[in-house]
Image (tube, helix red, strand yellow):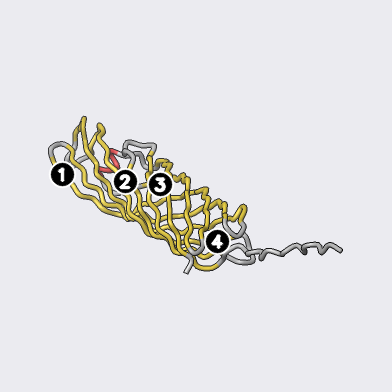
């Protein structure tokens, strides 16, 4: 009499939820006079267990440079054919993510968010150097895929945004009031 092997049931792992700490870096390309720049950020996310939603808060650093012709308003006044803008942004961003698909190792999500952009610009125009700082704004969307390896998670994000970073007379003369950006970020996350 032959004994049949009984099938062994493998444990089914539930999708991971809770707190996720992460850091990401990549490139952002503005559709304006500003050139492509680097972006780095740290992010804290909360992934809900019983709903296909997640929320995140991030703080970052981004830098861009531009060379452009601009009509600078008074008091400096005049046409600058090769004005230079060096712009540094410190975004604080809040996102809501819809989890389109997830299992115990993978996650695909679509997010929408708003950011306050603390902006510092250094411009050189008409033979003078000016520093301007202020607060800009951004509305953004992103599509992200994440793959988990134990407690560690790797993520790639494609993002699109509409933003305003001209915060002074000189930057307003050199930049459009609102412009679009696209970017790609690679991230590393940790589930504590």
Q: Look at the numbered disc 1 and give the secondary structure of its residue.
A: strand
User: Is 125 located above or below residue 87 in the figure?
Assistant: above
Residue at numbered disc 2: 166
**Residue extending furthest toward the top:** 81
Tell me the number on the disc at residue 178.
none
The residue lying at 45 percent from left, 45 percent from top is: 161
Q: Marks 3/1: CA distance?
A: 24 Å
Rendering coords of residue 7 (x, y %): 75, 62
How packed mark 2 is, by other alpha carbons closer than 10 Å (few <14, some 14-19, many 20 or more), is: many
Q: What quarter of the picture does the N terminus occupy? A: bottom right
Residue at numbered disc 4: 54
Q: Which circle, 2 or 4, is nearer the viewer? A: 4
Q: Which circle, 1 or 4, is nearer the viewer? A: 4
How packed mark 3 is, by other alpha carbons closer than 10 Å (few <14, some 14-19, many 20 or more), is: many
Residue at numbered disc 3: 163
Front residue of this view, candidates 189 and 54 = 189
How packed mark 1 is, by other alpha carbons closer than 10 Å (few <14, some 14-19, many 20 or more), is: few
The residue lying at 27 percent from left, 41 percent from top is: 65
Rendering coords of residue 110 (x, y %): 55, 51
Residue at numbered disc 1: 129
Q: Marks 2/4: CA distance?
A: 31 Å
Q: Marks 3/4: CA distance?
A: 23 Å
């Amino acid at each position: 009499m032959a004994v049949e092997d009984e099938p062994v049931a493998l444990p089914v792992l539930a999708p991971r939820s809770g707190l996720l700490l992460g850091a990401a870096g990549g490139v952002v390309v503005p559709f304006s006079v500003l050139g492509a720049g680097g972006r780095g950020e740290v992010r804290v996310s909360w992934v809900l267990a019983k709903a296909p939603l997640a929320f995140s808060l991030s703080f970052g650093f981004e830098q861009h440079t531009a060379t452009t012709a601009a009509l600078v308003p008074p008091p400096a006044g005049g046409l600058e054919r090769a004005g230079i803008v060096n712009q540094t942004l410190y975004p604080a961003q809040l996102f809501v993510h819809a989890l389109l698909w997830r299992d115990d190792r993978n996650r695909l999500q679509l997010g929408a968010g708003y950011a306050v952009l603390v902006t510092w610009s250094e411009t050189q125009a008409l033979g003078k150097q000016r520093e301007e700082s202020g607060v800009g704004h951004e509305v953004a969307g992103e599509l992200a895929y994440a793959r988990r390896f134990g407690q560690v998670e790797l993520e790639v994000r494609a993002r699109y945004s509409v933003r305003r970073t001209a915060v002074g007379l000189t930057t307003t003369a050199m930049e459009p009031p609102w412009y679009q950006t696209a970017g790609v970020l690679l991230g590393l996350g940790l589930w504590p």
